[in-house]
Image: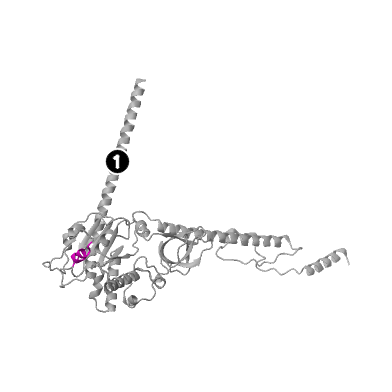
Amino acid sequence: MSKAEIKRKQNSEHNREKKIPRKNENDSKTDSDFSDDQIDPSKDVVFNMPKPGPHAKAGEWRKWKMMKRTIRQQREEKKILKAKEIETKKKNLEEYTKTSPEEKKGRSFTLSIAIPGSIMSKVPSKELKTYVAGQIGRAAALFCVDEIIVYNEYAIENKQHNDYNEQLIKILEYLECPQYLRKALFPPHKYLEHVGLLHPLEAHHHFKLNDHWEYRDGVVTDIPSKDGKGSWVDIGLLNKIEIDKKLQPGIRVTVKKLVADSGKIKGKVVSPETPRVESGLYWGYQVRYAGSFRKIIFESSFKGNYDLKISINLNANQLNLESIDKLPSAKRVLIVFGGVNGIEPAIEADEKLKANKLEQIFDFVCESKDADQKYGSRSIRLEEAILVSLAVLRPKFFEAMEEENFEKENKENEERSESNDSEDEENNEKNDLKIEENSEI
C-alpha cells in the first residue's frame, strides 16, 4: 500500500470519528443572510443552533457567531422598542392633559341653589319622595350646580322636619356619588330603599372602567403603604392606586393621575374644586344643611361670601324671570327657592336675622305674577321651577363672566400698549441725543 493510500484511509477514519452532520438549509446561508435589515424585533427567535465542536471548520464557527450576534441584536432592539412604546404613551397622556388654553378653560365661579326640605312633606309615598329628590339632583347636574343647600324654613328642630331634611340630603348625596363608591360609602338605609328607581346622573366624574381620566374620585382603603407615608385608594379600577398622603381609611378623596418614568400610575390627592378650577370640569355638587335662613346666606361650602344673591318665589305659581334682564359678574352665585308659602315665612321664622324684607337680603327678587299666564299649567312644582330658572339664568352668568374677561383683556392690552409707547419714546429720545452728540463732534 502506497503512502498516498494510507493517508486517504486515515482521513476517512478521522471523519467518521467526528460524525460530521449533513448540510441542511441553515448551513447553506451566508453571512449576508443574517443582516440587520432582516431582523424582526416583534418576533423572538430562540437560539437553538448547536455550538460547533473543537474540530469544526472555520465556516461553521463563523455562522454560529453570526447567529448569536443576530439574536443579541434582536433582543436589544426589543428592549428599545418597548422603551419607545412607554415613552409614546407618556407623551400622548401629556398632550391630552396639557391642551391649549382655548380648549381647556377653568371655571372660577360657583353656582349654589337653596331649597326647603319641606317639599318632601307634600309628597305622599316613599317612592315619590325618592323620585322628587332624584329630579332635583338631575336638574342640578344638568346645569352644573356646585352646591345644594337644604334649609329648614321653620327655624325650629322637630323630628318630622328633620326626617324630611335628612331624607332629601341622603338621596341627593347618594345620587352625586360615583357608582363604584356607593357600596363603601352608603350602607343600607331606610331612605335609600327605592333609589334603584332613579335615573343615574351620568355626570362627568361618574367614570366607567375603560374611560380615560385625568382626575378620579376614590375611597381610602386600610391597605398599608410600604414606606408608611402614603395610602392605597380604590378608584373603581381593577387595581388600587397609591397616593402621596397617608389618610384615614373610609374617606372620599379626589385623585389626580401621575405617570412615573417607568410607566407606573400613581395618584396625587387634590381638592374636589381642582378639576373645575384648572380644567373646567363639572365635578358634582356638595350638599349642606342650613338650620335657619341666615345660615343660607352667611355660611358656604366655598371660600368667600355670596356676592350675587337671587330669590325666586313660587307662592303665586308663576315665574317672572323676565324681570332679571342682565346680571353682573360674580364669583359666588346663590339662588334661593321658596316653598309653597314663599320665602317670607322662612325669613320671619329666623329671629336672629335682622333683615325682614327680600330687598334687604337679595340683589335680585324674582316675584311671581298671577296675571302672566304663560304656562299651560295652573301650578309649577319646585323641581320644575329649578329647571326653568337655571335654563334662563345660567347663560346670563356666563355672559357676565365673558364680558368681565373681555374688559380685563382690553385693559391689559391697553396698559401693555402704553408701556410699549413709553419705551419707544424713551428710545427715540436716546437716539436723538446720540445724533446731536455725533453732530457736535
Residue at (34%, 75%) from the top-left corner? 192
- Residue 187 is left or right of residue 289, and the answer is right
Q: Position of residue 226 (x, y in %)?
A: 53, 63
- Residue 38 is left or right of residue 408, and the answer is right
- Residue 166 is left or right of residue 44, and the answer is left
Q: Is residue 238 magenta?
A: no
Residue at (29%, 48%) from the top-left corner? 409
Q: Could you tell me which quadrant the N terminus lies in?
A: bottom right
Q: Is residue 348 magenta?
A: yes
Span highlighted in magenta in the image = 342-351
For badge 1, the amino acid type reads Ser
**Badge 1 density bin: few <14, some 14–19, many ≥20, Cα 10 Å:** few
**Residue 44 visible in the picture:** yes
Image quadrant in which you'd find residue 75: bottom right
Mark 1, residue position: 417
163 or 284, which is in the foreground?
163
- Residue 207 is left or right of residue 363, and the answer is right
Q: Secondary structure at mark 1?
A: helix
**Residue 213 visible in the picture:** no
Residue that lies at the very extreme toward the top in this rendered image: 441
344 or 311, which is in the foreground?
344
